Amino acid sequence: MKKLGIVVALIVLIGAVWGFWRTKPNDAKIEKLVLTGSSTIAPLAAEIGKRFESLHSNVRVDVQTGGSSRGVSDARAGLADIGMASRALKDDEKDLLGFTVALDGISVILNKANPVQSLNKQQIIDIYTGKIINWKEVGGNDAPITVVNKAEGRSTLELFLHYFGLKNTDVKPHVVIGDNQQGIKTVVGNPDAIGYVSVGTAEYGAGQGVAIKLLPLEGIAASVKNVRNRSFPLSRPLNLVTRTEPVGIVKDFIEFASSTQINDLIEAQYFVPVAR
């Protein structure tokens, strides 16, 4: 009977401990923070998220891509806590709040093996509208040009079209891609391709030995340095977007992402920190 009593006592004790752990929640409850949108911002947001999680053990940051339009749409619809838009908010998006965390530019890229070193603005327009179809017309090899364009909903596309005074229906693409890495892979895989991607992403890739080169624009080299000094003509803000004034963990994350604590992460992605 004594043994039976001990067993019963142990069972009761184990049950009490189990009940304690099951009803201990508040400080152990996991909060999920969802960010969606720009594929340009996503790698940076993921790195910021990891550092933020290291400081907030009860938070998990989920970063999803899909383009700036998705980020804006998801933030407005409440499908994401924070949208990511690699552009300024438009006039019909002024109901939303934007928080600039870094600056970036957009660069035209070629395969490193392509002998063409520069293209003027009109030549780029003529290539993308199908008026120039062979590299020999701009001093390159006798080879047909493969035009790589961005998909609808990408802010890179919108800014490229705006800068060159084009409509998407004017463009005659051979390949349509989504994110920056797809654009870079396409140009790396085709020595006769031309595309355009984030300056930061492209400069980082070229620095890592990826077989691409960034073309100057209006005589200004496409570089993080020139985005920083505001001399590069095609640049943009990288924004986090919310539907309402952020509170709670959303506010904490945006304040963290807007602080000098993550400048090293911004620079590691070859973007430019903004003045804090």
Image (spheres, rainbow, N blue to C red):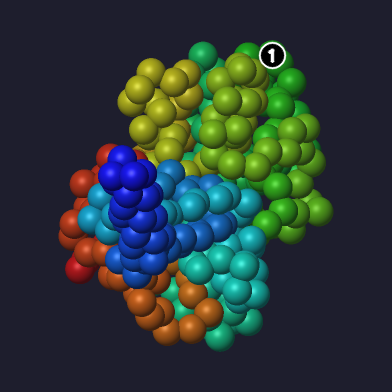
x 68%, y 38%: residue: 177
Depth check: give the residue in front, 123 or 252. Answer: 252
Q: Amino acid at mark 1?
A: Asp
The C terminus appears in which quarter of the rendering? Answer: bottom left
Q: Mark 1 = which residue?
A: 142
> Hey, which quadrant is residue 19 in on the image?
bottom left
Residue 166: x and y in percent read 70, 57
Depth check: give the residue in front, 165 or 106. Answer: 106
Q: Is residue 107 left or right of residue 222?
A: right
Q: Is residue 215 left or right of residue 275?
A: right
Residue that extends furthest to the front in the rendered view of this protein: 1
Q: Residues within 10 Å of mark 1 (few under 14, many from 20)?
A: few
Depth check: give the residue in front, 225 or 231. Answer: 225
**Does 215 appear above or below 31?**
above
**Does 78 appear above or below 155?**
below
Depth check: give the residue in front, 121 or 84. Answer: 84
Q: Mark 1: which secondary structure?
A: loop
x 38%, y 34%: residue: 203
Total labels: the figure holds 1
> Hey, which quadrant is residue 21 in on the image?
bottom left
Can residue 253 be seen in the rendering of this structure?
A: no
x 37%, y 50%: residue: 8
Residue 235: x and y in percent read 43, 56
Residue 257: x and y in percent read 31, 61
Q: Is residue 269 left or right of residue 218?
A: left
